[in-house]
Image (cartoon, rainbow, N blue to C red):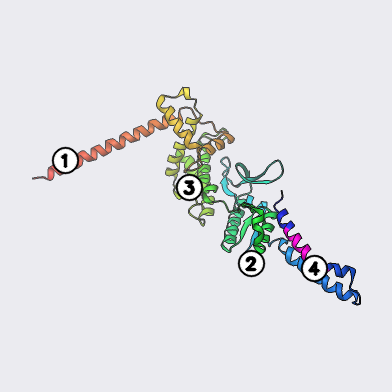
Amino acid sequence: MDRFVPVTAATGLLAGAMLGPLLTPAIRGIPGVPWVRVALPAGAFAAATCAYLYGGAAKPPPLEDEEAAPGPRLAEWEHRRDATAVLRVDPMTGDAMSCVFLCGTDNEGKDVGICSKAQAFLADGGKRAARGVDVRSLMARAYGRGCRLYGDGKVVRLDGALARFPMLEPLLGEGAVADLVAPPSTLDLRQRSCLTTDAVARYGYLRYGYDAPLAGARTAAARTIEDFAGVAATMADRSMDEAPSERHLADAAALEKLADRALACVELLRTPSDALSEGDRKIRLAVFEASQQPGGVVYLRELDNLLAKSGVMLPRGLWRAHSAGEQTRRRRLQAGAAALGVAAAAAYAARRP
């Protein structure tokens, strides 16, 4: 049953009870009294009563009207779509683009909200992402003024009717008014991990891309830092939750270290289990479980998809080489720490009388 039926039935019954006694004499007339003197006041009162009862059903002010009084507002489909837009970078070209999560509908055409897996990449230079920043700020300011945002115009009018006639709320039952529409959180947007993932994908394309000249690790890292200079400048004035880590987009050595490990993890995920040792299988399982979660500095699952779309074929044995390098560095650190300990002990013994 439509949520408006209890409201319209109650207000219709009230209007009929009030207007019936007024309109009957206005229609039939009163003996000895001119018809105009009866009909005109009755008609004016009936019109005023209808305007009072149903005036709240008028279309609410647009979300952009920040001078309007607080109340229910409609977050249009475009608002909810653009609110999910984030800045991304094409791994193959290094150009800025936008990524939005698409709104979905069920078989009956009813809006079911945002689908976290239905992404659309737009080669617009990041214009939609800039629009997303404005829309999220607009929605946050609306809540700050005491407004309530909904994704359905019927619910907006129902909220307005209940605010004027709170006695009708028991007729509707609990949950009649749908959940509020809130701007996506920084955790939902994943702006920081998205850009860092794009940077690693760009680094991987420059090193191992099919149609890209093979470049050394340091050269690929420096080129990636250069390509992301404009993006880093664009993100500089955003909050720390949305801005990417400056270290990963400004320091070639830090990006190289991060990217080499992330690419090695992707190569490990692509390697069949029967081609790995028992220890690597356990590491592969842990990496796979971690890749299913969107958190972290680099989103491995999306990195794998970006590399596949860019035609990047990672060399075999990348994980094994990375593990060997890590073990070598670990041994060197341990040997250095032991040498420092021996030197410190010898110095201390030499200073004793």
Q: Could you tell whether 172 is left or right of 46 in the image? A: left
* Residue 8 screen position, x and y as percent: 74, 57
* Residue 107 screen position, x and y as percent: 71, 40
Please tell me the numbered disc located at residue 69. Answer: 2
* Residue 321 screen position, x and y as percent: 42, 30
Q: Of the residues under marks 4 and 1, which one precedes in the sequence?
A: 4
Q: Do callouts 3 and 1 mark residues in contact (Cβ within 8 Å)? A: no
Q: CA distance from mark 2 to mark 1?
A: 78 Å
Q: Of the residues under marks 3 and 1, which one precedes in the sequence?
A: 3
Whether residue 21 is visible to the viewer of this picture, yes or no, is yes
Give the secondary structure at mark 1. Answer: helix
Q: Residues within 10 Å of mark 3 (few under 14, many from 20)?
A: many
The image shows residue 97, relative to residue 7, as above or below, that is above
Q: CA distance from mark 2 to mark 4?
A: 25 Å
Residue lying furthest left: 353
Q: Which residue in the protein does label 4 denote?
A: 47
Q: Which residue in the protein does label 3 denote?
A: 249
Q: Of the residues under marks 2 and 1, which one precedes in the sequence?
A: 2
